[in-house]
Image (cartoon, coloured by chain):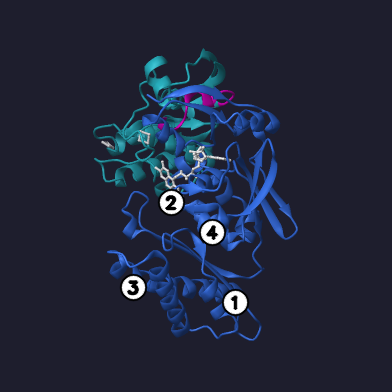
Chain colours: A blue, B cyan
């Protein structure tokens, strides 16, 4: 048995925001995280976001705007996203099972803020910004500032996540998405890495983006090694050097824990592999 | 709350108290007990039903959420001639042992064959990845689904 005091499914965004403004309702998207939370928690009033027209994918020049109610299945099967946000496409296709992807939404994934939320490291790669709405108005927050810690975000009272704005990848970027460990597994064995690489005509790295989940206190990009790699000639040596710096940063930011002797070599190997994989995809793409 | 939806091909109107999950509504109030509850956490797929043709876990939905949608349960799949080959193939290949996972497996298989007439073994595996079976070791289930697909293809020739 679940404990729901009230279930509302308004058809207009303004109505929904007005109800949210009352401060009593919990928003529901696909329910794949929420329904379990309703089973043992105190009874709640539910506001279903399904009918608000938030399941859109909009292509606008350099950016793609994704409605918060778009499911993982819809993202994974969208050709525009496969082309312009390939790492997000891949991340969504790896979420749970088909049943979960058919219901689970990108918005729910972000707001639930599990340390192993698959779409978050992918979206960070594309400088995602979140459009948050309340009866008081609209604000935009970079995803990198939204997640404050495990299951903690800066979502304000009465606010809903409306959509996510992503900056498209440059044409012909190589990329990789590596997910280690199962969702239910203990934290130590989980890690997610997302990378994309763009090469200059002279064979040097033009730009590179790297983000990590379950490495730092919050999912985040690693700007220090991104900067370090730009303008360099790619090699295993170089990638390993960058990965070592990332591992030192992890220890500095997350502190030396009982899991560090395990996590440090894993991060070094995985990040080296992630960068190598991204680059090899790029080379394969150029040849074909 | 009054809710109208389509269930196994027929329109239904119900008054829902709002404390039920979809699986509770199906099993306890509508007596559609073919849908099973295994884990109750979205992990085993025993509770799989079709929501507008797509497999979903009925243990992770609120009953009220189906308003305006179409639900097909294993009872609906079993009564649908288009899927008779799946049920037969499951029996013939020995893909059913204790049978607890079978309704969910068959519902997922029906959704797969409705969108992909010639699934490869990998596509079958991927489509059924959300359905766990503790008995068969999966190979017979995959065999059953590909056999059903072949028969459907032959009939259409
Ligand atoms: C078996 C299983 C496997 C899973 N595997 C994975 C996996 O591999 N990777 C992964 O990342 N996740 C996984 N998940 C977790 C979950 O499916 C995802 O996080 C999913 O994206 C959540 O989306 P939802 O629409 O179902 O959210 P809901 O459950 O509807 O909501 C989740 C939370 O976010 C809030 N919320 C939702 N939408 C909004 C919005 N637009 N504005 C404001 N608040 C909102 C809700 O109030 C709730 O607190 C799995 C879950 C299960 C049950
Ligand atoms: S009972 Fe729903 S997935 Fe196990
Ligand atoms: S036949 Fe027993 S769980 Fe599948």
Q: Are marks 2 and 1 on the same chain?
A: yes
Q: Which disc is residue A287 wearing?
A: 1
Q: Residue B26, image x and y in percent?
A: 42, 21
Q: Give the residue displayed 46% in from the left and 24% down from the top.
A: A4
Examine the structure image and report whether residue B60 is included in the region drawn in magenta.
Answer: yes
Q: Which chain does the residue under circle 1 lie in?
A: A
Task: Read off the chain for label 2.
Answer: A
Residue situated in front as seen by the camera: A93 or B121: A93
Q: Residue at x 42, y 52 (%)?
A: B122
Pick the residue in front: B111 or A245. A245
Q: CA distance from mark 1 to mark 4?
A: 26 Å
* Residue B75 in the image, given as x and y percentages of width and height: 42, 23
Quick check: A274 above or below B121? below
**Residue beneath label 3, please?**
A265
Q: Give the CA separation, mark 2 to mark 4.
A: 17 Å
Estimate the x, y position of residue B130 in percent, counting from the top left: 39, 43
Residue under label 2: A150
Q: Nearer the viewer, mark 1 or mark 4?
A: 4
Numbered disc in front, either 2 or 3: 2
Label 1 with label 4: CB-CB less than 8 Å: no
The numbered dot on residue B81 is none
Cα gap from disc 3 to disc 4, whole angstroms? 23 Å
* Mark positioned earlier in the residue sequence (1 or 3): 3
Mark toward the start of the polypeptide (2 vs 1): 2
Q: Dot 3, how many residues are within 10 Å of its Cα: few (below 14), some (14-19), or many (20+)?
A: some
Q: Is residue B82 magenta?
A: no
**At numbered mark 3, what does the secondary structure look like: helix, strand or loop?**
helix
Q: Determine the chain carrying the residue at label 4.
A: A
Residue behind mark 4 = A122
- Confirm whether circles 2 and 3 share one chain: yes
Q: Quadrant of the N terminus of chain A?
A: top left
């Amino acid at each position: 048995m679940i404990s729901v005091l009230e279930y509302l499914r308004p058809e207009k965004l303004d109505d929904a925001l007005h109800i949210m403004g009352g401060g009593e309702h919990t928003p529901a998207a696909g329910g794949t995280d929420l329904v379990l939370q309703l089973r043992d928690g105190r009874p709640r009033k539910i506001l279903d976001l399904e009918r608000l027209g938030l399941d859109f994918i909009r292509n606008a020049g350099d950016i793609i705007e994704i409605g918060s109610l778009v499911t993982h299945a819809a993202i994974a099967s969208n050709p525009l996203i496969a082309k312009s946000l390939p790492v997000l496409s891949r991340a969504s296709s790896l979420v749970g099972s088909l049943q979960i992807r058919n219901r689970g939404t990108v918005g729910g994934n972000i707001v639930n803020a599990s340390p192993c939320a698959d779409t978050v490291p992918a979206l960070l790669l594309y400088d995602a910004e979140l459009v948050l709405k309340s009866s008081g108005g609209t604000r935009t927050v970079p995803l990198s500032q939204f997640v404050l810690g495990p299951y903690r975000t800066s979502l304000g009272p009465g606010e809903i996540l409306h959509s996510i704005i992503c900056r498209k990848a440059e044409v012909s970027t190589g990329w990789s998405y590596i997910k280690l460990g199962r969702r239910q597994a203990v934290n130590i064995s989980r890690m997610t890495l997302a990378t994309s690489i763009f090469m200059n005509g002279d064979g040097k790295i033009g730009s590179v983006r790297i983000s990590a989940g379950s490495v730092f206190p919050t999912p985040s990009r690693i700007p220090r090694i991104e900067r370090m790699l730009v303008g360099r000639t790619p090699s295993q040596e170089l990638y390993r050097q960058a990965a070592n710096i990332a591992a030192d940063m992890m220890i500095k930011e997350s502190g030396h824990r009982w899991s560090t002797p395990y996590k440090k070599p894993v991060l070094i190997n995985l990040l080296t592999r992630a960068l190598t994989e991204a680059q090899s995809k790029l080379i394969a793409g150029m040849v074909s | 709350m009054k809710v109208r939806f389509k269930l196994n091909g027929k329109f239904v109107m119900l008054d829902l108290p709002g404390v039920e999950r979809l699986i509770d509504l199906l099993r306890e109030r509508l007596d559609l007990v073919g849908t099973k509850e295994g884990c109750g956490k979205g992990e085993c797929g025993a509770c799989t039903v079709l929501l507008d043709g797509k497999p979903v876990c009925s243990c992770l939905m609120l009953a009220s959420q189906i308003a305006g949608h179409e639900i097909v349960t294993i009872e609906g799949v079993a009564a649908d001639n288009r899927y008779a080959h799946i049920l037969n193939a499951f029996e013939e290949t020995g893909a059913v042992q204790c049978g607890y996972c079978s309704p969910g497996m068959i519902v997922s298989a029906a959704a797969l064959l409705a969108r992909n007439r010639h699934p490869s073994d990998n596509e079958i595996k991927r489509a059924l990845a959300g359905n766990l079976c503790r008995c068969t070791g999966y190979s017979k289930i995959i065999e059953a689904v590909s056999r059903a697909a072949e028969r459907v293809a032959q009939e259409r020739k």
